[in-house]
Image (cartoon, helix red, strand yellow):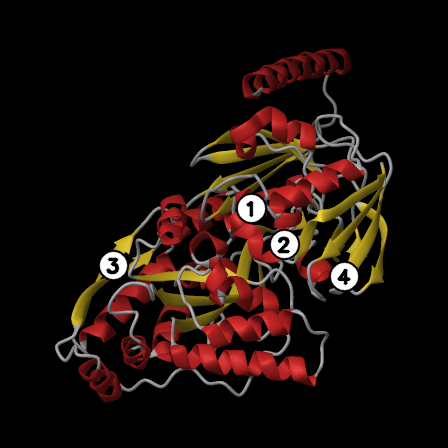
């Protein structure tokens, strides 16, 4: 496909030159030809996608690509409201029953028309063992209840009352609607050959180098103003910024503190910032000794001077985290403070746990510069209480797979909520049924937490529900499966001619609204 397009492009250039020469010869001069309009947006990101199958992963790098390819039954608009997308309308029949009317005439990228049967197939996959990565979103769904009323109507029931279902589960990229025929034809390779209904369709994936998409001209919504979209993983953050400055890319994700001031002063660049729905943390594998002892976990929390770590590394981007629910999320407890830094208390707890001389361990991180820097500072702080921690930098795909299997001791990662309900911030991360790939990479188990999480997700918003989530934040903080590090901020830089782009607090961004200004 790439070679074919390249050949067409070369032919177009030759024809253009012939026409230009003819005009020049006929007119004996004339005005300078207009510059060719840009039709390709190139985005630089920190990591390659893991898969483009919506149920195969729950990471931001993959979602950043899938958002351009797929659509959902409903979406969250700029005002934070839930509005229909592939659904024409929907209604709640009773506390656990929903009916969706599907828009007619919507075509998948393979030419197949969207039908209610595709929605049924999508939700069955998401709720199956294949969808372990997004299972927390769909475990409330009673898949046996999925009923195709006609080609454009589907009904579904939940196993229990779950008020956030539409706003969180059905808007998440894990709920992206797939084409049954395309998925079955591709089999295990579907994640490398995705077919959606979105504004861009898949062209090619060169692992570690780029993902190429092209505008879907049969798209049922507002078509993109440009033709081609290229997403390039450029892991080294300063190289990514330099690519933006030189014009090699148009959009640069995850601007680092080292590059921020320079980019802000560059007249050819615009820097956009928004506090996101995420928390970065250092988790501890609570199924491994000595992290199965709460005193050891608490000691590590006391040994880490979180504000110093965050201020030293992030220098004004985001802020130190105090608990598992970020400030943007409903029922965030603003009274919580970052964990106390107390070396003597940490030493005392280690002594009580039978480890007066400390122990040897490791900290896993991916190759993001800021995470490596945080790990280095924490490594030095842990030495003060006798803990020797080796830093292991692991490639992103291997990192996700290894932490899902429980190979890690301690590990640095972030979790970004795809909605503003606290269930989406807590359930997958702390419920014992979600160990590993389900989201709970600390392999944390607490029966009280399990009970409160199930109660909270089944309640309508109320003072009683708020109390449950405040209790959860206090309990999790005391149990210390995580050292809370920072509440994140999305910092994205774009070339000055890029308009229509707004970074999202979800961490993955709509690219189909971009326009090249001044052409």
Callouts 1 and 4 close, C-beta under 8 Å: no
**Distance Cα–Cα, label 1 vs label 3:** 31 Å
> Residue at coordinates 54% horizontally, 83% vertically from top-left?
471
Q: Which residue is mark 2?
A: 138
Report the residue marked by disc 3: 391
Quarter holding the N terminus is top right
- In the rendering, which numbered label is found on residue 96? 4
Q: Position of residue 114 (x, y in %)?
A: 78, 35
Circle 1 residue: 131
Closer-to-camera residue (57/438): 438
Check whether the beta carbons of the residues at disc 1 and disc 2 lie within 8 A of each other. yes
Describe the element under mark 4 as helix, strand or loop. loop
Number of numbered discs overlaid on the protein picture? 4
Tags 1 and 3 in contact by the CB under 8 Å rule?
no
The mark that comes first in sequence, 1 or 3, is: 1
Q: Position of residue 517 (x, y in %)?
A: 70, 46
Cα–Cα span, label 4 and label 3: 47 Å
Q: Residue at x 53, y 65 (%)?
A: 278
Residue 198 against residue 387 in the figure, above or below: above
Q: Earlier in the sequence, mark 4 or mark 2?
A: 4
Camera-near label (4 vs 3) is 4
The residue sitting at 37% across, 53% down in the picture is 403
């Amino acid at each position: 496909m790439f070679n074919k397009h390249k050949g067409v492009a070369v032919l177009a250039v030759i024809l253009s030159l012939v026409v230009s020469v003819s005009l020049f010869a006929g007119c004996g001069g004339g005005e300078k030809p207009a510059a060719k309009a840009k039709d390709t947006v190139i985005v630089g990101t920190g990591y390659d996608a893991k898969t483009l199958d919506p149920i195969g992963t729950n990471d931001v790098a993959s979602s950043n690509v899938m958002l351009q390819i797929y659509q959902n039954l409903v979406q969250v608009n700029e005002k934070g409201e839930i509005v229909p997308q592939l659904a024409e309308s929907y209604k709640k029949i009773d506390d656990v029953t929903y009916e969706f009317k599907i828009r007619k005439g919507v075509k998948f990228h393979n030419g197949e028309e969207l039908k209610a049967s595709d929605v049924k197939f999508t939700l069955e996959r998401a709720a199956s063992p294949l969808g372990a990565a997004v299972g927390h979103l769909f475990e409330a769904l009673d898949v046996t209840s999925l009923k195709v009323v006609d080609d454009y109507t589907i009904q579904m029931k939940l196993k229990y009352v779950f008020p956030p279902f539409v706003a969180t589960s059905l808007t998440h990229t894990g709920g992206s609607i797939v084409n049954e025929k395309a998925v079955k034809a591709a089999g295990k390779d579907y994640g490398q050959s995705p077919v959606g209904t979105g504004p861009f369709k898949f062209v090619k994936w060169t692992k570690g180098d780029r993902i190429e998409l092209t505008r879907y001209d049969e798209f049922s919504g507002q078509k993109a103003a440009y033709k081609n979209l290229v997403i390039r993983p450029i892991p080294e953050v300063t190289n990514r910024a330099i690519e933006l400055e030189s014009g090699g890319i148009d959009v640069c994700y995850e601007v680092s503190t080292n590059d921020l001031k320079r980019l802000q002063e560059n007249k050819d660049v615009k820097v956009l910032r928004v506090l996101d729905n995420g928390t970065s943390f250092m988790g501890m594998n609570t199924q491994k000794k000595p992290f199965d002892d709460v005193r050891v976990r608490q000691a590590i929390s006391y040994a880490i001077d979180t504000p110093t770590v965050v201020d030293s590394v992030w220098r004004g981007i985001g802020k130190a985290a105090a608990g598992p629910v970020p400030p943007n999320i409903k029922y965030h407890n603003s009274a919580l403070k970052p964990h106390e830094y107390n070396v003597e208390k940490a030493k005392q707890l280690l002594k009580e746990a039978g480890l007066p001389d400390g122990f040897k361990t490791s900290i896993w991180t991916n190759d993001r510069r800021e995470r490596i820097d945080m790990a280095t500072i924490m490594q030095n702080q842990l030495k003060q209480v006798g803990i020797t921690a080796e830093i292991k930098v692991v490639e992103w795909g291997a990192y996700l797979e290894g932490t899902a299997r429980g190979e890690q001791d301690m590990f640095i990662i972030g979790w970004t909520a795809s909605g503003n309900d606290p269930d989406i911030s807590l359930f997958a991360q702390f419920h014992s049924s979600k160990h590993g790939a389900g989201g709970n990479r600390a392999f944390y188990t607490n029966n009280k937490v399990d009970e409160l999480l199930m109660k909270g997700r089944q309640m309508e918003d109320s003072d009683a529900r708020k109390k449950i989530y405040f209790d959860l934040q206090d309990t999790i903080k005391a149990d210390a499966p995580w050292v809370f590090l920072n509440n994140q901020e999305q910092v994205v830089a774009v070339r000055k001619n890029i308009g229509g782009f707004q970074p999202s607090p979800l961490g993955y961004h709509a690219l189909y609204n971009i326009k090249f200004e001044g052409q």
